[in-house]
Image (spheres, rainbow, N blue to C red):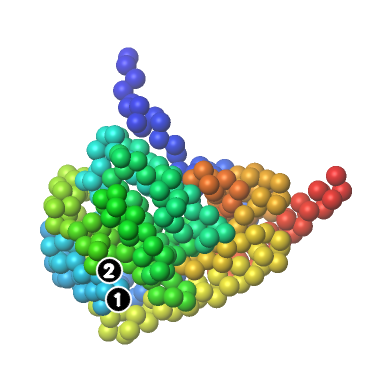
Amino acid sequence: MRDFVTDKAKNIAPSGIRKFFDLAAGQDDIISLGVGEPDFVTPWAIREAGISAIKKGYTQYTSNKGLLQLRKEISDYLAAAFNVRFSVDETVVTMGASEAIDITLRALVDSGDEVLVPDPSYVSYRPCVELCGAKAVSVECDGENGFILTPENLEKAVTDRTKVLIFPYPNNPTGGVMTKKDVERIIPFILKHDLFVISDEIYAELSYGEKHCSIAAFPEMQGRVALISGFSKAFAMTGWRVGYVCAPAPVTSALLKIHQYASICAPSFSQYGALAGLKQCREDGFKCVREMCEEYDSRRKYVYKRLTEAGLTCFEPKGAFYIFPCVKNTGMTGAEFALKLLEKEKIAVVPGDAFGEFGKYYVRISYAYSMKNLVVAMDKIEKFVNGLKNEKENG
């Protein structure tokens, strides 16, 4: 019998995150700092709206684009929060930001095109590009420079086949952010090479210090940005699977066709929940989001302090809920460090090479966990690193 599986499917590497956590599965007493999921319960106003929608029988398909009321709230929210203006008709509600990434890439790139992907960055960008038959080209983001994109590194990676730049800030896994000044530096590069930008802003609300700056807000970028976001992170709605993409009409028209055939629409009760979340947050000044962000900020400061005291080189994250320490001074790669840490101390972190070749000597730690678990985990990591130092000193 023939081998029916496609070469594309065979050649796609499994998620480096899931691959590592398969090793941890079934082991007792493990503290996991690996999954990028808020430890908060979805705010009650959202849960209540979802329950109410089910009780009222709002369980049918919605419009392919999503509930009109929700798309209007998203449009108004982006304008008020980030000075980003997309119309209701330029907004499509999706099955989380993950689907939005997939269908936007499929609408934009053909076989043979090239897509610039910051490295390190979220694990799904490269596979989604490759499944389109396009080529993902890594752009190095240096920890000493805050893991940001620079015109110099972009110029090294661009070719005459480059069509799209993925712009994922605040960044997973590094916690890096692009300030207004940083964004202004790369806009001339984008215009010079006539590129389209996919701006993944799922962590926009989780910025510490300087307010998030969206590349879609710049007048020069009108007509060449698709903004992707959702409710999973800032609203603690990971399991609800509701996100969105806002883009110029020709792009939304194309990706909507893919969305129609792939998933039809996001879950109806989830859309009603998201709608309630935006309305409630607008009315109370986004109190629930601010409270979560303040808690993450406290954890961020604590974890950064403990890791640096343990002797690991760390960039202090400015957004999202991850920290990306370099473990090169231990004499190990990130994969080796993560495996031995799991074996010796029962602490699970993610090897940095899951996020790209330039993450080889890093590990990703999520601080979206309780302070109780973070304290225990930091104690064990410090003990582990000190043990490695003693082994090295004693030969």
Res 71 quadrant in image: bottom left
The percent position of residue 122, horizontal first and vertical second, equals: 43, 52
Residue at the spot of label 1: 81
Q: Secondary structure at mark 2?
A: helix
- 1 or 2: mark nearer the eye: 2
- Of labels 1 and 2, earlier in sequence is 1
Judged from the image, the secondary structure of the residue bearing numbered disc 1 is helix
For the N terminus, the quadrant is top left
Q: Residue at x 82, y 53 (%)?
A: 390
Instruction: Measure how far apart labels 1 and 2 are at the Cα level.
Output: 11 Å
Where residue 291 appears, as percent x and y from the top left, is: 44, 79
For residue 132, say whether it is visible: no
Q: Position of residue 56 (x, y in %)?
A: 17, 69
Residue furthest to the top in view is 1
In percent of the image, x 60 and y 44: which residue is there? 335
Q: Which picture quadrant has residue 131? A: top left
Q: For this rendering, which residue is in front, 393 or 375?
A: 393
The residue that disc 2 covers is 217
Count residues near mark 2 (Cα–Cα under 10 Å), then give few for <14, some for 14-19, many for 20+. Answer: some
Mark 1 neighbour density, 10 Å: few (under 14) some (14–19) many (20 or more)? few
Q: Amino acid at mark 1?
A: Ala
Judge whether residue 338 can be spotted in this image. yes
- The type of residue carrying mark 2 is Ala
Looking at the image, which residue is at 45% across and 50% down? 153
Q: Is residue 30 above or below residue 209?
A: above
- In the shown orientation, is residue 74 left or right of residue 187? left
